[in-house]
Image: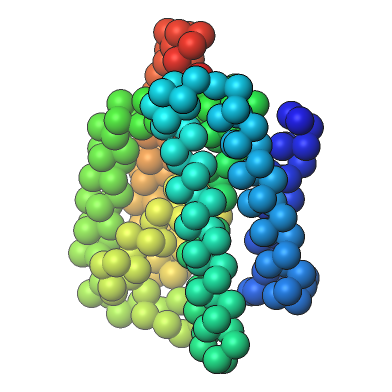
């Protein structure tokens, strides 16, 4: 039953690859039949679990409640989407976001649930580092606006360069990953090679210092929560 549960969870999650919009779309009838089949298997698995579990224990377990709510939401969304489709009304399958609930909350997924809870407990403790990083990003973006915004510089495509604050924040955020390096700095560098110092300082502070600090905080806190979590905490 564990293998069957994992198979249908994988099948349910894979439907997003074939549902509209998708690269390899399948007919709505085919994907809907497969989804209903998966939901029936999940409901049968939950019913079987209820038969071998004490009544009060079963209903006190939030995992079972989450699975039942996810099944109900998925069926409701599928029915609404199907009716709207008959009347040629465009809609969105909003219930897709609840599909990972099945992966986390079934009893067979104890290790996944343990890792998920460790990540959840780690998030509040990395908030301070994230806020410091965002503060640094916003300050560098403000400096970039003052340095380059009044120079009437243009990109290679002829677009205004660093004149909109929100666009600067986004460009510098991408620069943290070095995905747009060195293209993002070339208009300023062509105007004056001294402006390269600004981007060098930005990369050192945000890419090498903050990202390393962020990774260290995430790793240490995740490892700490993973060690201190009791064995039965994820059941």
Q: Residue at x 76, y 69 (%)?
A: 30
- In percent of width and height, residue 209 lies at 39, 31
Whether residue 149 appears in this view of the structure is: yes
Q: What sort of colour scheme is used for the picture?
A: rainbow
In the rendered view, tell whether residue 151 sits above or below residue 169. Answer: below
Q: Quadrant of the N terminus?
A: top right
The answer to whether residue 1 is left or right of residue 216 is: right
In the rendered view, tell whether residue 186 sits above or below residue 232. Answer: below
- In percent of width and height, residue 17 lies at 70, 62
Q: Residue at x 53, y 58 (%)?
A: 74
The answer to whether residue 222 is left or right of residue 144 is: right
Q: Residue at x 26, y 40 (%)?
A: 131
Q: Residue at x 71, y 37 (%)?
A: 5
The quadrant holding residue 142 is bottom left
> Which of 19 and 228 lies nearest the eye of the viewer?
19
Whether residue 209 appears in this view of the structure is: no
- In percent of width and height, residue 9 lies at 68, 44
> Which of 49 and 179 lies nearest the eye of the viewer?
49
- In percent of width and height, residue 85 lies at 58, 84
> Which of 201 and 223 lies nearest the eye of the viewer?
223
In the rendered view, tell whether residue 130 sits above or below residue 230. Answer: below
The answer to whether residue 225 is left or right of residue 46 is: left
> Which of 147 and 184 lies nearest the eye of the viewer?
184
Q: How many numbered marks does the figure carry?
A: 0
**Residue placed furthest toward the bottom:** 87
């Amino acid at each position: 039953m564990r293998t069957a549960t994992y198979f249908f969870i994988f099948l349910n999650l894979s439907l997003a690859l074939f549902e509209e919009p998708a690269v390899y779309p399948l007919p709505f009838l085919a994907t809907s039949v497969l989804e209903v089949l998966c939901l029936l298997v999940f409901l049968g698995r939950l019913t079987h679990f209820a038969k071998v579990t004490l009544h009060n224990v079963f209903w006190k377990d939030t995992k079972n409640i989450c699975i039942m709510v996810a099944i109900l939401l998925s069926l409701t969304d599928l029915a609404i989407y199907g009716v709207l489709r008959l009347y040629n009304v465009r809609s969105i399958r909003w219930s897709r976001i609840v599909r990972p609930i099945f992966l986390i909350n079934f009893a067979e997924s104890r290790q996944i649930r343990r890792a998920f809870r460790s990540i959840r407990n780690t998030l509040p403790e990395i908030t301070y580092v994230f806020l410091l990083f965002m503060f640094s990003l916003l300050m560098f973006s403000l400096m970039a606006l003052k340095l380059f915004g009044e120079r009437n510089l243009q990109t290679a495509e002829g677009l205004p360069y660093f004149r909109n604050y929100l666009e600067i924040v986004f460009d510098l955020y991408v620069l943290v990953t070095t995905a747009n390096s060195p293209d993002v700095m070339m208009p300023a560098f062509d105007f004056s090679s001294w402006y390269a110092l600004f981007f060098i300082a930005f990369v050192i502070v945000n890419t090498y210092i903050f990202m390393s600090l962020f990774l260290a905080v995430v790793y240490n806190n995740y490892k700490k929560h993973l060690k201190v979590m009791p064995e039965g905490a994820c059941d």
